[in-house]
Image (cartoon, rainbow, N blue to C red):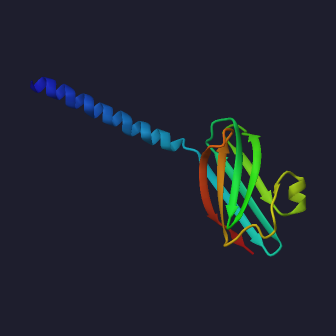
Amino acid sequence: MKTKMLKISTLLGATAIFFATSLAAADANAAGIRIKCEKKSNRSSISVDGRNLTPGSYSAVVKSGDNKAVAELKSSTGDEVEFDFDSDKGDIVAGAVAISPIFIQGGKVTGQIKDADGFIIIEGTSSCRVR
């Protein structure tokens, strides 16, 4: 009986260690988001970058106050994808999504990265640099 109990407790211990290390490994590869934003008197600028993503197509949504802007689907480069939103005409011509110079409200922006089916993969909020 003691031998059987020892085998069961050894098996349970090994199983617990396996799951604990699996969770730590999964966390290390979790998707990440970085949101950078800047508000000037005549300009709003936002960058949403995703990392550790499964290669595929993604879109981005940014919100600030009652304002919302959406970037269309684009393919990731490896496991990363980058989206720019700006009110500067030069940056818009270079590919940024057009937003109003007063888009950023209250000094904060929330960004989301969505997969091709529209499901939110990751979301974050950032305080903006105000100049």
- Residue at 76 percent across and 67 percent down: it is 103
Corner quadrant of residue 56: top right
Q: Quadrant of residue 34?
A: bottom right
Side of 105 relative to 8 (left or right): right
Quadrant location of the N terminus in the rendered image: top left
Q: Is residue 116 left or right of residue 121?
A: right
Q: Which of the 4 quarters of the picture holds residue 79? A: top right
Q: Position of residue 32 (x, y in %)?
A: 59, 49
Residue pictured at 60% horizontal, 45% vertical: 121
Q: Could you tell whether 124 is left or right of 12 in the image? A: right
Residue 92 against residue 80 in the figure, above or below: below
Which residue is painted at 63% across and 40% down in the image? 53
Between 40 and 67, the one lying in front of the other is: 67
Does residue 97 appear to the left or right of 129 in the view shown? right
Q: Position of residue 50 (x, y in %)?
A: 66, 48
Count of numbered circles on the image: 0
Q: Position of residue 23 (x, y in %)?
A: 43, 40
